[in-house]
Each structure stands twice: as structure tokens, then as C-alpha cells.
Image (cartoon, rainbow, N blue to C red):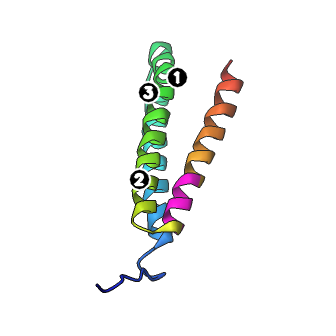
Amino acid sequence: MKKEIITEKEQNLGSHLGIRIIAVLLFLFILFLIFITGNAETIYAIIEFAPYIIGAWIIFIIIEAVILLVNKKRKLAIANFTLIIISALFSYFLYNQLA
């Protein structure tokens, strides 16, 4: 059996994080557009729905990080766990400010 060696080139950390950051920025831009064009009820609905969106994001990242660990792509898995920590801290500070 030939052992598969995963090189640094296969673990393209920049594009991995870039895709996730672009997705988050696009989502925040959509929320900003809704915030500008909406009324008070729309804004209240966004604030109420935000924990579910962030929770779904964190669950997706956890599943992906576990898959990357199984596939022996440690750098990408560590990057995902870092994104989880950043998301959790952001949520914590955001909701403490809103409360």
C-alpha cells in the first residue's frame, strides 16, 4: 500500500479561509441591506433570528473541521476551529451589547 502524503500545496489555507470570509461578508451585507430598507419589525426579526443562523454556521464548521481532521488536513481543521472560536466570541459580545 502506498502511503498518501499531503503536502502544503494541497492545504490551501488562504482560499479555504477566503471562501468562508467572503460568505460571511456577503451575509452581513445582505443583513445590512435589510436593515437599511426595513422597518422596526424587520430589524427585530433579524435580531431574533441571528442566534439560529450563527448556530447553524458553527455546526457546519464543526462538521467540516472533523472531516478535515479525519482526512489529515490539520491546518485547515485548525483554521475551522479558529473560525468557531471567533464566531462564538462575536456572538457573545454582540448579544451582551444588545441586552
Q: Magenta segment, which residues?
A: 75-81
| Residue type of the residue flagged with mark 2 | Glu
In 3D space, how far apart are the residues under numbered discs 2 and 1 (Cα atoms)?
26 Å
| Residue type of the residue flagged with mark 1 | Ile
**Pointer 1: what residue?**
47
- Residue at left 42%, top 80%? 6
- Residue at left 49%, top 55%? 21
The quadrant the C terminus occupies is: top right
Helix, strand or loop at mark 3: helix
Q: Where is residue 74 in the image (x, y as percent from the top left)?
A: 51, 67
Disc number for residue 37:
3
Residue 57 placement: quadrant: top left
Label 3 vs label 2, nearer the camera: 2
- Among the two numbered marks 1 and 3 on one chain, the one whose residue lies closer to the N terminus: 3
Relative to the observer, which residue lies in front, 50 or 85? 85
Q: Position of residue 53 (x, y in %)?
A: 44, 32
- Among the two numbered marks 3 and 2 on one chain, the one whose residue lies closer to the N terminus: 3
- Residue at left 41%, top 48%? 63
**Pointer 2: what residue?**
64
Left or right relative to 87: residue 41: left
| Residue type of the residue flagged with mark 3 | Thr
- Among the two numbered marks 2 and 1 on one chain, the one whose residue lies closer to the N terminus: 1
